[in-house]
Amino acid sequence: MQILRLSAGLMLAVALLTSCEGIQKAKEAANAVSVAKNYAMNLGEGQKKMEERRAKGDTLALPYADLQKYLPASVGGYEKDGEPEGQTMNMPGASYSVAAQNYKKGEQTLKISITDYNGAQALYGMATAMMSSGFSSENADEKIGGIDLGVGKGWEDIKKKDKTASVVVGLSDRFFVQAEASNQENADFVKDVVKSMELSKLASL
């Protein structure tokens, strides 16, 4: 009976893989399995680190004003455009905080944001699962996919027609650092922006 079930499964797989729609569905299914597997693994690792922080009394996200201190005063010729933004949210079972700063260089814009998910590990795990899944996609409008900048796994998104590029990197199983810039042909500049920040200090928290 088990052999019959396996044979039926193989026949179905062959039938699916011999059609364009089947190939797409197979890719989607494989990606979903990969993301789910990575989510479970990331969540487990994150929960362990979160428990270690809880043992030290570290259970909440940093106040947004503290996160703002890790935003650069200027970067790559871009100067601050206005005051930094921020918000801290605390609720039963969840705590997160975000700080952001806009920058400008002539007509070109850059935005850097830092998010602390110290008290919302499930949200962090879901986001990093895609980063670690090996997924990538490219068409005439957009190129997206996982990256590794050496400081943490991340994600790049290049909007070809709009000429905007962004990257986000996960740190220490709690932080996301994101940079988004206009007038970009690729993600090289925003990658350099993230790597130029004092991420080691942030990750050590």
Image (tube, rainbow, N blue to C red):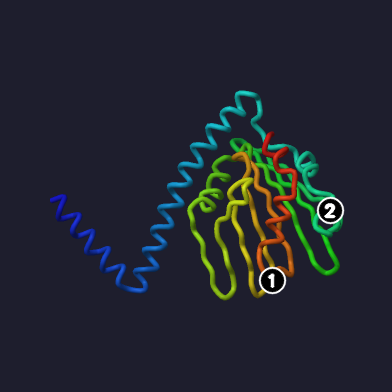
Secondary structure under tag 1 reads loop
Residues at marks 2 and 1, CA–CA distance in whole angstroms: 22 Å
Q: Nearer the viewer, residue 193 or 53?
A: 193
* Residue on which the image places disc 1: 163
Residue sticking out furthest to the front: 150
Determine whether 119 is above or below 150 in the image: above
Image coordinates of residue 128 in percent, x first then y, are 55, 48
Q: Tell me if 15 is positioned left or right of 37 in this view.
A: left
Q: Residues within 10 Å of mark 2 (few under 14, many from 20)?
A: few
Residue at image position (74%, 47%) is 197
Pointer 2 or 1: first along the chain? 2
Residue at image position (54%, 44%) is 125
Image coordinates of residue 162 in percent, x first then y, are 68, 72
Image coordinates of residue 29 in percent, x first then y, are 39, 59
Q: Nearer the viewer, residue 93 or 45?
A: 45
- Picture quarter with the C terminus: top right
What kind of residue is marked 2? Answer: Ser
Residue at image position (64%, 31%) is 59
Q: Residues within 10 Å of mark 1 (few under 14, many from 20)?
A: some
What kind of residue is marked 1? Answer: Lys
Q: Tell me if 195 is positioned left or right of 143 in this view.
A: right
Q: Which mark is residue 100?
A: none
Q: Tell me if 189 is positioned left or right of 173 in this view.
A: right
* Residue on which the image places disc 2: 74
Image coordinates of residue 184 in percent, x first then y, are 71, 68
Residue sticking out furthest to the left: 1
- Please count the marks in the image: 2
